[in-house]
Amino acid sequence: MRIDLHTHSTASDGTDTPAELVRNAAAAGLDVVALTDHDGTGGHAEALAALPAGLTLVTGAEISCRFDGTAVGAPGLSVHMLAYLFDPREPELARELDLLRDDRVPRARAMVRKLNELGVPVSWERVAEIAGDGAVGRPHLATAMVELGVIGTVSDAFTSEWLAGDGRAYVAKHELDPFDAIRLVKAAGGVTVLAHPLALKRGACVSEGAIAELASAGLDGVEVDHMDHDAATRARLRGLAADLNLLPTGSSDYHGSRKTCRLGEYTTDPEIYGEITRRATGAFPVPGAGG
């Protein structure tokens, strides 16, 4: 059983439509795929309508979070929280997701202005065209920079020179406190997993102390097997998950052609997936016709 619990579609910053994503997941030999677009659930309906036989869809989202500075070793640090199988109609969580999405446009416009000041002739019109109906974000700006020949790949934008958290053109956005994210997702019947917590190439990483605090607050798991974690990091995280009684997951973080990762490049153990589904009460995995 092959299970990939972290993917993105054109509903945020992927290049596959939700329908294409589930078809590609089936073609890649996956049995289960989670659609976890940034700060929203806008792609779920299309993915469900196109779900092929033999593939099960886990509905989810990747929520933008920032520590308020009181957690151990994580002052003001941005992190991403994967949320699975929550009820998207739960009012408080729905309001927060709306706020997160709404702040993305002014933030992206501000980064365009900063890039222009740095001599990069990116236009807001082109960034908006690349984003389409998705939740506009840094990968869309990075794609525009690749088109202009400023950088070679989308990943090259995520450095201190450009769009990383300490980058010259970076602009902060509205983000949810991760402890509040856990509380809200739990209240909506969902399950929370901290995404790529030790992805050092992305900048400063959350401390083990902060992960322990999140675990005490009800965090369910940590994403261990991920393209941005080397073998030593994966082993370290697996040990930490065992110490903190957290579920270790694995996933591709697939973005279509925008990143090099492949669907199913990393996967989640079926027993861990089973525990995630047992804990969820807000929504349930949906099998494709005949699945």
Image (cartoon, rainbow, N blue to C red):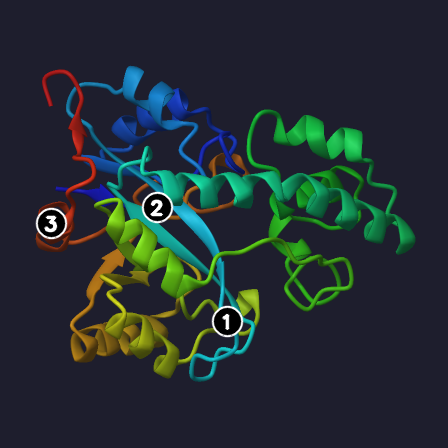
- N-terminal of the pair, mark 2 or mark 1, is 2
Q: Which residue is mark 2?
A: 6
Marks 1 and 3: in contact by CB < 8 Å? Answer: no
Name the amino acid, label 1.
Leu
Residue 198 position by quadrant:
bottom left
Marks 2 and 1, Cα distance to the nearest angstrom?
A: 19 Å
- N-terminal of the pair, mark 3 or mark 1, is 1
Q: Is residue 226 visible?
A: no
Question: x, y percentage for residue 288?
Answer: 18, 21
- N-terminal of the pair, mark 2 or mark 3, is 2
Question: x, y percentage for residue 270?
Answer: 11, 49
Secondary structure at badge 2 equals loop
* Residue density around tag 3, few if under 14, some if 14–19, many if 20 or more, within 10 Å: some
Question: Residue at image x 52%, y 71%?
Answer: 68
Of residues 70 and 5, the one nearer the viewer is 70
Of residues 243 and 263, the one nearer the viewer is 243
Q: Which residue is mark 1?
A: 200
Question: x, y percentage for residue 31?
Answer: 18, 34
Name the amino acid, label 3.
Pro
Of residues 66 and 206, the one nearer the viewer is 66
In the figure, is residue 135 to the left or right of 86? right
Marks 2 and 3, Cα distance to the nearest angstrom?
A: 15 Å
In the figure, is residue 160 to the left or right of 259? right
* Residue density around tag 1, few if under 14, some if 14–19, many if 20 or more, within 10 Å: some
Q: Is residue 142 visible?
A: yes
Q: Which residue is mark 3?
A: 270
Secondary structure at badge 3 equals helix
Name the amino acid, label 2.
His
Q: Residue furthest front?
A: 91
Question: Residue at image x 42%, y 80%?
Answer: 207
